[in-house]
Image: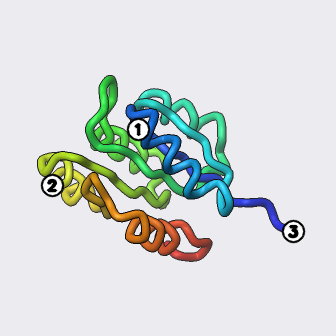
Amino acid sequence: MSEKPTLLVVDDEELIIELLTDLFEDDFTVVTASNGMLALKALREFPAIQGVITDLHMPLLNGVELVKEIRQIYPNLPVLGLSGTLKSSRESFFQGIPFLQKPFEVTELLLLARRLFQPGAH
């Protein structure tokens, strides 16, 4: 049996982190971070991370800035943005990442994530 791919989930809302962990833990090893600074630390500590789901509006280092950092260090790492604000959604569009507006439909999230994070999908 092959090892599960690793997914990084970044959100400052604990409830969202718990929801996403529950949704993805059967198919992925889930690593979590509550802000962009901790997400960058996790990316250094877990080089096997194969995808990122991040909130775009967070304290310290927001998701848009996180995506900019990820693109410099890991240009091919797939990233999915989540946002409760239209401004952040527009910013993610300009960063070239797909995003879902909060609240999102779980089935839509699962379909998009599977498409983005499947091996060979990017």
Alpha carbon distance from label 3 to label 1: 31 Å
- The residue depicted at 43 percent of the width and 46 percent of the height is 70
Question: Of the residues under marks 3 and 1, which one precedes in the sequence?
Answer: 3
Q: Earlier in the sequence, mark 1 or mark 2?
A: 1
- Secondary structure type for disc 2: helix
Residue identifier under label 2 = 90
Q: Residue furthest left?
A: 87
Q: CA distance from mark 1 to mark 2?
A: 18 Å
Give the quarter of the figure containing the N terminus. Answer: bottom right
Q: Residues within 10 Å of mark 2 (few under 14, many from 20)?
A: few
* Three-letter amino acid code at the position of disc 3: Met
Residue at 45% x, 31% y is 34
The spot of residue 36 in percent (x, y) is 40, 33
Q: Looking at the rendered structure, which numbered label has been put on residue 81?
A: none
67 to 59, vertically: above or below: below
Q: Given the image, on which type of amino acid does mark 1 rest?
A: Asp
Q: Position of residue 46 (x, y in %)?
A: 66, 41
> Residue beneath label 1, please?
11
Residue located farthest toward the right when viewing the structure as drawn: 1
Q: Which mark is residue 1?
A: 3
Give the CA distance from mark 2 to mark 3.
41 Å
Residue sitting nearer the eye, 97 or 85: 85
26 displayed left or right of 120: right
Question: In the displayed structure, does residue 69 sit left or right of residue 62?
Answer: right
Q: Residue at x 50, y 34 (%)?
A: 33
